[in-house]
Amino acid sequence: MSMKNRVKEAFQALDTYTPQSLKDTFIKLNITLEELQPYLKDPDDKPYYRQMIYEDDEVEMIVMNWADIDCAPHDHGHSTGWIQVMNGETKQTIYQAEGETLPLPLYTEFKEKGSLFFAPEGGIHKMGRKGEHDLVTLHLYSPPIRGMRVYDLETCAACVVSSDCGAWWPEEQRQLVQEIKLKKEMNKEEA
Ligand SMILES: [Fe+2]
């Protein structure tokens, strides 16, 4: 059976979409880099090339082929996610933000090939490639991401992007759903 059909059958058979059941299904699918190869294209000038592997009302699975550019800090709307590193190593920075404030970096960590890590609802992160090695990551989100917020820390702004846009400031106006001006978080002494 083709990888795409295997994925389709596995998700169509699911009746619960808890983080644990999604993780179990993801592991059981045992998707290889070789199977993803036909879906990897050149990212051009973007942080990654993204290709949808499967999508229904409850889940979406997307493969990302990374360039040597970090994505922008972003959330995943109201979705939770699992991210598997298919080769190379990824560098992930986790941010904290409250309401409409500028996200502040909390910590940076590295995830090697084979790692499967969780992206909680409302969490803000950015990812990139560590070193020169190619990086391919496979992402499973539930429900499919809608209303993803992308941050531009330099201009202290955020925007909600359309579902076909990756984690970068959109170049096309139609992908920019809403723009938000952020507040710089004030220190307690200044408040
Ligand atoms: Fe993400």
Image (cartoon, rainbow, N blue to C red):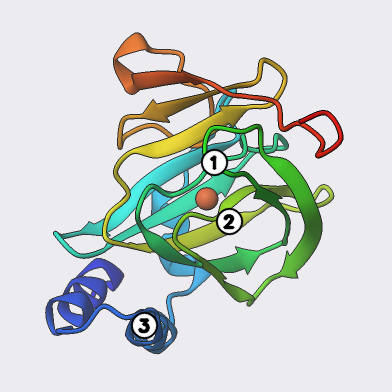
Residue where numbered disc 1 is placed: 74
Task: Give the amino acid type for the residue marked by disc 3 in the picture.
Answer: Leu
Residue where numbered disc 2 is placed: 136
Mark 1 or mark 3: which is in front?
1
| Rendered location of residue 26, percent (x, y) | 39, 79
Q: Quadrant of residue 44?
A: top right
The residue at the point 54 percent across, 41 percent down is: 74
Task: Give the amino acid type for the residue marked by disc 1 in the picture.
Answer: His
| Rendered location of residue 27, percent (x, y) | 44, 85
Tell me the quadrant of the picture where the C terminus can be found: top right
1 and 3 marks in contact (CB < 8 Å): no
Residue where numbered disc 3 is placed: 29
Which sits earlier in the primary sequence, circle 1 or circle 3?
3
Q: Residues within 10 Å of mark 3 (few under 14, many from 20)?
A: few
Which sits earlier in the primary sequence, circle 2 or circle 3?
3
In three-dimensional space, the C-alpha distance between marks 2 and 3, rounded to whole angstroms, equals 17 Å
In three-dimensional space, the C-alpha distance between marks 1 and 2, rounded to whole angstroms, equals 19 Å
* Residue at disc 1, secondary structure: loop
* Residue at disc 3, secondary structure: helix
The residue at the point 36 percent across, 20 percent down is: 178
Task: Give the amino acid type for the residue marked by disc 2 in the picture.
Answer: Val
Query: Eyeballing the image, is 45 above or below 108?
Result: above
The residue at the point 44 percent across, 60 percent down is: 121
Residue 93 visible (yes or no): yes
Q: Which mark is residue 151?
A: none
Tell me the quadrant of the picture where the N terminus can be found: bottom left
Query: Eyeballing the image, is 94 above or below 140?
Result: above
Q: Mark 1 CB in 8 Å range of ligand 1? A: yes
The residue at the point 32 percent across, 34 percent down is: 164
Viewed as shown, does residue 51 lie left or right of 182? left
Q: Mark 3 CB in 8 Å range of ligand 1? A: no
